[in-house]
Amino acid sequence: MIHNSIVESPFSLNILNGNLIGGKVIEAKKCLNDLVGFFDDESKRSEMKQDELIYEVLSLLPVKENTEGGLFFGRTIIHPGKVGDEYYMTKGHFHSNSNRAEYYWGLEGEGMLILMNRDRNTWAERIFPGSLHYIPGHVAHRTANISNIRLIIGACWPSDAGHDYDEIQNKGFSSRLMEVNGKPQLIG
Ligand code: M6P
Ligand code: ZN
């Protein structure tokens, strides 16, 4: 039992790159072949190198998935690149417990947080080192890298939020972030 003693936190965070150490940290990597159907130009995606790494996620899970009242902490790296004119991005999701909110913040690179509500209205916020984003419940979220270097973001979300990819997998977001004349633009 811990009684009246000073102990070290079991977790540590590299505040420059979001790297997480200690406790239960799980890593997920998504290559182009994990993203079938997520980009506008599926035929272009299918012609590209399928094992190219698009994004990688570290998640610190101090409690079991679905625990009410707990918090998870994550770091996502989105590598630079495009499928056609569409920037590399995460799949994006609603939360399974749809009203659960989330924080994102920018650590390195430049990107866009693309948001879509249940009425399928889409908008975006610019991500940069130090940007902070409150994602309300019932709002789907995905991040796209608009720079030539890796985009690194941090995230914190409730342990009972869960991920619901269905609508995004089937219908996508109502707008896509494309490069138009060298600049990012929401199209659709
Ligand atoms: C952030 C968090 C994670 C999420 C990850 C990648 O780190 O929101 O919960 O898994 O981004 O996003 P996605 O699951 O949509 O691919
Ligand atoms: Zn989320």
Image (cartoon, rainbow, N blue to C red):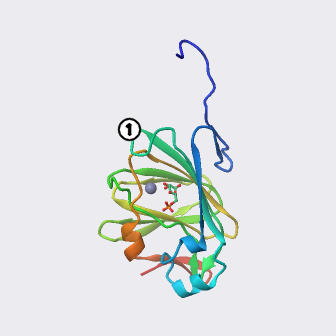
Residue 147: x and y, percent?
65, 69
124 w.r.t. 8: above or below: below
Residue 61: x and y, percent?
51, 43
- Neighbourhood count class around disc 1 (C-alpha, 10 Å): few under 14, some 14–19, many 20 upward: few
Q: Nearer the viewer, residue 51 or 141?
A: 51
145 w.r.t. 136: above or below: below
Q: Nearer the viewer, residue 141 or 95?
A: 95
Which secondary structure, mark 1?
loop
Residue at point 29% right, 69% down?
119
Q: Nearer the viewer, residue 167 or 65?
A: 65
**Side (left or right) of 76 relative to 166:** right
Q: Which residue is mark 1?
A: 69
Residue at point 37% right, 60% down?
139
Residue at point 35% right, 71% down?
121
Q: Nearer the viewer, residue 29 or 142?
A: 29
Q: Quadrant of the C terminus?
A: bottom left
Question: Does residue 173 appear in the picture of this structure?
Answer: no
**Side (left or right) of 94 relative to 86:** left
- Ligand 2 within 8 angstroms of badge 1 C-beta: no
State the residue lying farthest toward the top.
4
The amino acid on which the numbered mark 1 sits, given as a three-letter code, is: Gly
State which quadrant residue 173 falls in. Answer: bottom left
Disc tally is 1
Residue 33: x and y, percent?
58, 74
52 w.r.t. 72: above or below: below
Question: Does residue 19 appear in the picture of this structure?
Answer: yes
Residue 86: x and y, percent?
56, 79
